[in-house]
Image (spheres, rainbow, N blue to C red):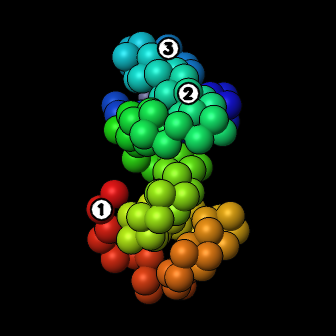
Amino acid sequence: MAPNVTYLCPTCDNRIHLHLQQCPHCKADLTQIAEAGEAADVCFNVGLDAARRQQWADALCSLALVLHYRPEDAGAWVLAGKVYARLEAKDRARSCFAAALRHAPHDEKAQAALEAVGGDPSPRNTLRGFQA
Ligand SMILES: [Zn+2]
């Protein structure tokens, strides 16, 4: 999954792939960022696995780490929201799905998930500040 993830180089603001060790534009050393990205991928997979085994607390711990590294990761927000929905924590689920939609406004999975827990996926409701 890592090769598809891009971010802005902290030095030159060009969009680059997360797994790169060095920026191809300005040659900045990106080793630590690449490692954080890999850590986020590992955490996401651990969280997904825990969710499939219905180990919700483990899943949320791993997803919290993913979102620490990658707060813009809509997929991680959606998965966290689904875990909260399973735990009947609908307010938190709504916040997670709304956060996903702030980063990926056209994500149909997030829109459907938000509606399923009684939220409104229209932009005016998801652009407000939410906290996980
Ligand atoms: Zn750069």
Mark 1: which amino acid? Gln
Would you identify the image quadrant in which residue 54 lies? Answer: top right
- In three-dimensional space, the C-alpha distance between marks 3 and 1, rounded to whole angstroms, equals 32 Å
Q: Say which of marks 3 and 2 sits in front.
A: 2
Which residue corresponds to the image point at 29% horizontal and 62% vertical from the top-left? 131
Q: Which mark is residue 21?
A: 3
Q: Position of residue 13 (x, y in %)?
A: 41, 40
Q: Nearer the viewer, residue 79 or 37?
A: 79
Q: Earlier in the sequence, mark 1 or mark 2?
A: 2
Give the SS element for disc 3.
loop
Q: Is residue 24 visible?
A: no
107 is higher (above) or lower (below) than 35: below
| Disc 3: CA contacts within 10 A as few (<14), some (14-19) or many (>=20) | some
Q: Earlier in the sequence, mark 3 or mark 1?
A: 3
Q: Say which of marks 1 and 2 sits in front.
A: 2
11 is higher (above) or lower (below) than 98: above
Which residue corresponds to the image point at 47% horizontal and 65% vertical from the top-left? 88
Mark 2: which amino acid? Val
Q: Nearer the viewer, residue 126 or 85?
A: 85
| Disc 1: CA contacts within 10 A as few (<14), some (14-19) or many (>=20) | few
**Quarter of the picture holding the C terminus:** bottom left
Q: Which mark is residue 46?
A: 2
Q: Is residue 96 visible?
A: yes
For the residues labelled 3 and 1, say whether their Cβ atoms are less than 8 Å apart: no
For the residues labelled 1 and 2, say whether their Cβ atoms are less than 8 Å apart: no
